[in-house]
């Protein structure tokens, strides 16, 4: 198989993941694996097969349309991984099932709050500023310079809010640990793509930034939205708000292609310069991981490699429990 071959010391860009509570989720083309360290210091692993049609069929090979897979990763697969990790974190002593109504209600409310905060607020804020500047005196503007400036203001508000939000939550101790696992995920994938051995000592030497990071995806969506929405002018407010919601898949599809292009051409100096803001923003969502975090990320990734036929299952060993690696919050029995 061609995807099993090293190419100039580098391996193909087929993998992704995200940090979860006290762990990491890794995704390949055949399965996803979540590895979480529980309150006893054990690494617990959950594996789930992925849809052939969605991850290995025509969709994933169709430009722009395949951006929907990226959305599914964040909203579907990623959400389930987060809820499973929460179940592991609270332990059996608490009668809480985050995969039940409590979890889905929490996620639903979070999504509504996120859409209201990061879509409606910038849209309304830009409309108000446009009125003050005389660019949209009646709240609307045809396609042209005025609409472009107001949409640019909307994008800047979005980016500013995103950065401030990430900075604020990053000061919470448990979120700092989450960002450490995010750094471990990046280091592990960087090590694999460079053809290096997957050991904590080797993986730790790789950078915490990655050009395909979800943080980079969000920033790219914000920039793409300015260009796309400028083609629509500034319609009346109801249509304006509706367009922001309806066009989310379009923005995701374009942003996905931009991210994939930058990842494939990251070795080119011009591309490196253009993606520098994306890499800089990742320093807000990643931290240098501790060794035990790297162990968890490697366990999750090796399970994915097993499903790809790139690693024998007996080689994907789980390290012995390490009570010293447990989150102080879990030790106190409070959950995370």
Image (cartoon, rainbow, N blue to C red):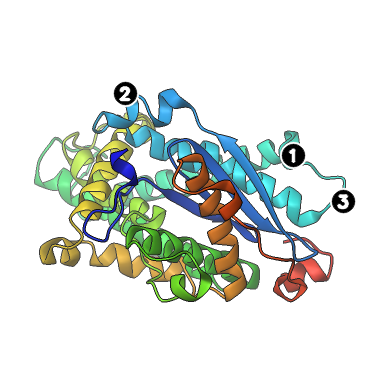
- Specify few, some or many for label 3: CA neighbours under 10 Å numbering under 14, 14-19, or 20 or more: few
Residue 254 shows in this picture: yes
Mark closer to the chain start, 3 or 2: 2
Percent position of residue 198, x then y: 47, 64
Q: CA distance from mark 3 to mark 2?
A: 43 Å
* Left or right relative to 66: residue 189: right
Which of discs 3 and 1 lies nearer the camera? The answer is: 3
- Identify the disc placed on residue 102: 1
- Specify few, some or many for label 1: CA neighbours under 10 Å numbering under 14, 14-19, or 20 or more: few
**Would you place residue 15 above or below residue 249 in this image?**
below
Residue beneath the point at 74% across and 76% down = 324
Residue beneath the point at 65% across and 68% down = 174
* Left or right relative to 141: residue 290: right
Q: Residue furthest right?
A: 93
Percent position of residue 240, x then y: 32, 34
SS of the residue under disc 1:
helix
SS of the residue under disc 2:
helix
Residue 169 shows in this picture: no
Residue beneath the point at 34% across and 45% down = 4
Quarter in which the N terminus is drawn: top left
Quarter in which the C terminus is drawn: bottom right
Percent position of residue 153, x then y: 26, 55
- Residue situated in front as seen by the camera: 160 or 41: 41
Q: CA distance from mark 3 to mark 1?
A: 13 Å
Residue beneath the point at 58% across and 54% down = 316
Q: Dot 3 corresponds to which residue?
A: 94
Q: Dot 2 corresponds to which residue?
A: 58
Q: Quadrant of residue 291?
A: bottom right
């Amino acid at each position: 198989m061609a995807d099993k071959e090293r190419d100039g010391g580098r391996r193909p860009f087929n993998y992704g993941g995200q940090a979860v509570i006290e762990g990491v989720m890794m995704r390949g083309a055949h399965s996803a694996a979540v590895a979480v360290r529980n309150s006893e210091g054990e690494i617990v692993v959950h594996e789930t097969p992925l849809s052939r049609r969605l991850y290995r069929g025509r969709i994933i090979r169709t430009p722009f349309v395949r951006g929907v897979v990226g959305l599914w990763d964040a909203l579907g697969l990623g959400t389930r991984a987060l809820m499973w990790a929460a179940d592991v974190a609270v332990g059996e002593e608490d009668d809480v099932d985050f995969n039940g109504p409590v979890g889905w209600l929490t996620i639903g409310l979070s999504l509504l709050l996120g859409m209201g905060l990061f879509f409606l607020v910038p849209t309304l804020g830009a409309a108000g500023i446009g009125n003050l500047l005389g660019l949209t005196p009646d709240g609307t503007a045809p396609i042209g310079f005025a609409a472009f400036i107001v949409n640019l203001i909307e994008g800047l508000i979005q980016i500013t809010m995103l950065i401030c939000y990430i900075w604020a939550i990053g000061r919470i101790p448990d979120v700092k640990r989450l960002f450490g696992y995010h750094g471990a995920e990046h280091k592990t994938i960087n090590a694999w793509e460079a053809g290096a051995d997957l050991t904590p000592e080797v993986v730790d030497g790789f950078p915490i930034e990655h050009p395909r990071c979800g943080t980079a995806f969000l920033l790219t969506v914000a920039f793409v939205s300015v260009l796309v929405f400028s083609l629509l002018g500034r319609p009346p407010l109801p249509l304006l708000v509706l367009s922001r919601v309806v066009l989310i898949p379009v923005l995701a599809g374009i942003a996905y292609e931009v991210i994939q292009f930058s990842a494939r051409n990251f070795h080119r100096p011009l591309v490196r310069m253009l993606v520098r803001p994306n890499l800089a923003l990742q320093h807000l969502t990643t931290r240098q991981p501790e060794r035990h975090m790297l162990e968890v990320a490697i366990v999750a990734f090796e399970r994915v490699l097993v499903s790809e036929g790139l690693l024998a299952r007996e080689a994907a060993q789980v390290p012995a429990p390490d009570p010293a690696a447990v989150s102080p919050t879990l030790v106190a029995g409070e959950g995370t």
